Image: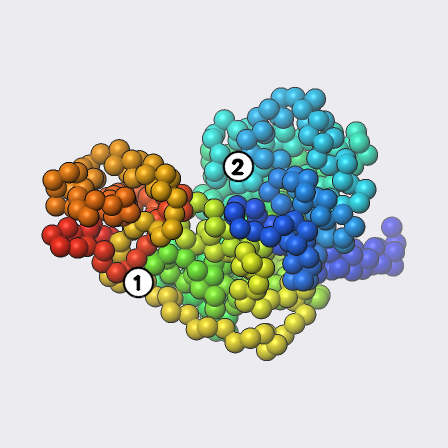
Amino acid sequence: MGLLPLYFFFLFLSVSSGEFSSQVGVNYGQLGNNLPSPKQSVKLIQSLRAKRVKIYDANHDILNALKGTNLQVCIMVPNEIINNISTSQKLADSWVKTNVVPFYSTTKIRYLLVGNEVISGSPKDIWPNIVPAMRKIKKSLKAHGLDKIKVSTSMAMDVLESSFPPSNGTFRSDIADSIVRPLLQFLHRTKSFYFLDVYPYFAWVMDPKNINLDYALFESRTIKYTDPVSNLTYTNLFDQMVDSVVFAMKRLGYPDIRIWIAETGWPNAGDIDQIGANIYNAATYNRNVVKKLTAKPPIGTPARPGWVIPSLIFALYNENQKPGPGTERHFGLLYPNGTNIYGIDLSGKTPDSCFEPLPRPDNNEPYKGKIWCVAAKGVNETALSSALSYACSQGNKTCDPIQPGKKCFKPDSLFWHASYAFSSYWSQYRKTGATCYFNGLATQTAKDPSFGHCKFPSVTL
């Protein structure tokens, strides 16, 4: 190929990729009992000026609601059926025939993930079956003439055993050769993407003393970090995290596989003991990451300057049924009633000055004091009774003081007994990962619920 044609080839590639990169999407989770209908949700997604949407299954109501829109769609094979699909081409064919074929002509299904953060949250027996299941799904898509759909799986940052400095990025030794290498081989062969979930929030929370908050929020104008090995200079935490995966893939012999940001975001609220989870930080981070990802020409990262980074912001809604700490239920761009938590334009075209002023943050420093875990008001009494039984069954004399005749038995109330049990359980087991959640039946409070001679156990920060 002569010099001039080669130049135009790369110019075309650059322009095409630039157009591709300028479209930020949103993750549409459904773990809430108060969310708008799929049709309403699609309108809301469009109002955010998103160009892509990812769902965590292949919900037919949602796929029907997406018909005729210009939204690119990413669907997902649930983690729990990966094992079965990995050993049965017939089952893979059936899944594709049921969940892809009927919708493809009118719904722009372009990406299909086999599992969501399988390494992080699913039993180990599933791990070796991710790639075999991906192969069977890809084969089925090809058989139906749908081989343009890119197949992948999503990975969190915990698949790395080292991420700092970025040049030292290394996949965990227990999965590098057995899981990740076959995955990268598949992605390379099929020209697909490495779908990465990257949350600077969680990295910052783990070490807020040494990681500057502005650096995590893309707000720093003076803080820079130069990797001592690569000599690349970083101005934000997001780029550091992404490049650590770039170097990890390079270490396994795959330096050019494209990265897709499957999830990124910042919580707009959380529990009392969770710092930095507020509307100000969430709006700041998401607005800034959208600006970066929609920039023309593409910015890329220090290790991949000018590369396009397709992306999806997490999440569309605050989802009230997500388990875990309070932040898990507060990553939304919208409240469940469909109103904006803060102004944002996923096209990146609206200046920040056009949005309403943001409330100043009041929890960017760790909370100091006592916290109790009590029953939430208005919850189902049958469920509350079951949660009380669970907390009391964990031993360590968790519920001895609320037994008949003991100092915390009165008032003889399910609400107060559960509140005591929750506080007692949480104070004992928080250090081993217990949360003040109990399937949405509990909430944290800084107000001491103790009464009379009954002193409620607490967590002191």
Residue 324 x/y as whole percent: 41, 46
Label 1 neighbourhood size at 10 Å, few (<14), some (14-19), many (20+)?
some
Residue 355 left/right relative to 213:
right
Residue 232: quarter of image: bottom right
Viewer-nearest residue: 270 or 265: 270
Q: In the displayed orientation, state which residue is furthest to the bottom.
A: 353
Q: Position of residue 440 (x, y in %)?
A: 40, 47
Q: What quarter of the picture does the C terminus occupy?
A: bottom left
Residue 93: x and y, percent?
72, 27
Query: What is the spatial separation of the Cα atoms under label 1 and label 2, in whole angstroms?
Result: 33 Å
Q: Tell me where residue 16 appears, x and y as whole percent.
A: 78, 57
| Residue furthest front in the image | 412
The kind of residue tagged 2 is: Val
Quadrant in the picture for residue 300: bottom right
User: In the image, which is nearer the foreground, mark 1 or mark 2?
Assistant: 1
Say whether marks 1 and 2 touch (CB < 8 Å): no
Numbered tag placed on residue 460 in the rendering:
none
Residue at the image point whose x is 59% and y is 59% from the top = 338
In the rendered structure, the answer to whether residue 117 lies left or right of residue 324 reads right
Residue 367 numbered mark, or none = 1
Whether residue 433 sits left or right of residue 64 in the image: it is left
Q: Quadrant of residue 404?
A: top left
In the depicted view, which residue is nearer to us: 169 or 60?
60
Question: Could you tell me if residue 224 is visible in this image?
Answer: no
State the residue at coordinates (26%, 53%).
372
| Vertical placement of residue 189 versus 34, above or below | above
Q: Amino acid at mark 1?
A: Tyr
Residue at horizontal 29%, vertical 47%? 415
Question: Is disc 1 placed on a helix, strand or loop?
Answer: loop
Residue nearest the observer in this picture, 265 or 166: 265
